[in-house]
Structure formats: C-alpha cells, structure tokens
Amino acid sequence: MEPAIILVRPQLGMNIGMVARAMANFGLSDLRLVAPRDGWPNPDAGPPAAGADHVLASARVFATVGEALADCHLSYATAFRPRDVQKPVRTPREAAAEMRGSPAKAGILFGPERSGLATDDIVTVQTLVTIPADPGFASLNLAQAVLVLAYEWFLASAVPPASPERVPAPQADLEGLIGQLNDALAETGYFFPPQRTRATQRTLAGILAAARFTADEIRTLRGVIRALSRPRPPGRD
C-alpha cells in the first residue's frame, strides 16, 4: 500500500507542484496538505508539476497533522531528532523497507520549507527519518526530500509483507488513547507544576507512539483507563 506524502504547512505552490512531480516519478499519488499557507488549490502548483496533474487533483487538505495521519497505521517524520524527543531514527532505505514490508497504511510528514517540522508535529509520530548528506551542506529542499523517500519506496518493492498480527493501530486510535490518558491524569492533578504540563504530555505521547500498539491493545488500554477513572464502589476498599 502506497504511503501518504503529507506536507505540513507548505508555503509555496511551486514547491507543492514539484513534490507532485517527484511523487508521480515513482508511482505515488496520495498527497495530503496540512494548513497550506496560501490555501488550496494553488495555480502556482500546476507548471512545476510537469504533468503530474492527477496528484494535484486528488490532493486533500487537513487542518491538523493528527487529522492527516488519522487513517495511517505507520507514521514517519523527516526531521532531526529534537533533544527532548526520544524516537527511533531510520534512513530512507530502512523506512521504505519497513513500509513495503507491512500491509498497513503509512504516512510521511515533511515540514515547512523554512523551518521544518515543529516538536508538536512529531510528538505522536512513531519514527523519524533522516536523510544522510554531507554535514557541510545537509539542507535539502522540500521536493528533494520527497524524491529521496519516494525513490527508496519504489526500489523496496520486493520486500515481503509482514505478519498482519502486529499491524499498528490507525493514528486516530492512538490520538484517542493519548487524549483519554491526558484527561484522566488532569483529573487527578498529575500535571504539576502547570508550566510543565505540555512537556510531560509530549513525553507520555512519545512513549505511547513508540510502542506501536495494535487496535486491540489500544482498546484494552482505554478500558483500563476508564476503569481506573471510575469512583470505587462502596465497600471495595
């Protein structure tokens, strides 16, 4: 199953067009845009797409990263690992082999042209992808980064599929678990001091994302949280 290419807050229509061309070169067509700066559709995207009009025509717009990843069971982000985020890191070749070897839907995040992905964009993503390059000149433009991942995915077509028993749950299920846990912990006063709340939530989200829980496991964990959140019946001390 082909991965979704997800551009987070892309800034220039011409760059979106070049991404569409890179995707079409290697058989990808699922383009998703999160809060594009200049809206969508964008007439500047057409000429640099160089005929990849089918990719542009089917592109979908989402308000948040979570919504764009909602149906994805595997999630990746092209980013250097922030100091306060501990996640596994793969090369494009390793990530492509993992995606090809799974029957599950994958989504790959690419950040804005100027700033890249923010920490909050990647906190619930399972894996980071770093493209090896000359340390003295390691910056790639948006279309180049997409091209590298699309090329490696195309080459990895011979990887056998993984066992379906360990397919991670869709991202929407993971987001639901994280939200439920945060709400339950807030009720207990766990987040203290208040100014550390977001940092603690990021840490917890990272732990849950890294586990790659299946849908059944997430249902079980949500049931546990619900049970722990209920008032204890009288006489059950």
Image: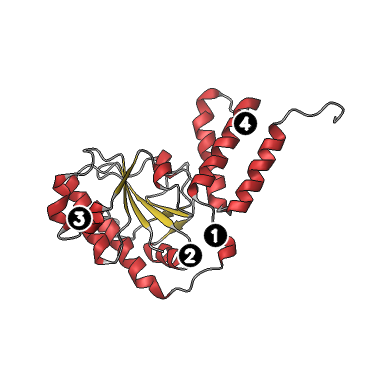
Disc number at residue 185? 4
Please tell me which of labels 4 and 2 falls first in the chain. Answer: 2
Please tell me which of labels 3 and 2 falls first in the chain. Answer: 3
Circle 3 crowding by C-alpha within 10 Å: few under 14, some 14–19, many from 20: many
- The residue that disc 2 covers is 103
Foreground tag (4 vs 2)? 2
- The residue that disc 1 covers is 167
Which element carries disc 1, helix, strand or loop?
loop
The percent position of residue 113, horizontal first and vertical second, equals: 25, 45
Please tell me which of labels 3 and 4 falls first in the chain. Answer: 3
Question: On screen, 185 above or below 219?
Answer: above
Q: CA distance from mark 1 to mark 2?
A: 8 Å
Which of the pair 92/72 is nearer the observer?
A: 72
Visible in this render: residue 14? Answer: yes
Q: Quadrant of the C terminus?
A: top right
Foreground tag (4 vs 1)? 1
Total count of labels: 4
Q: CA distance from mark 4 to mark 1?
A: 28 Å
Three-letter amino acid code at disc 1? Val
The percent position of residue 83, horizontal first and vertical second, equals: 45, 43
Which of the pair 186/70 is nearer the observer?
A: 70
Q: Residue furthest right?
A: 235
Which element carries disc 3, helix, strand or loop?
helix
Three-letter amino acid code at disc 4? Leu
- The residue that disc 3 covers is 18
The percent position of residue 97, horizontal first and vertical second, equals: 43, 67
Disc number at residue 222? none
Question: On screen, 194 above or below 65?
Answer: above
Tag 1–tag 2 contact (CB < 8 Å) = yes
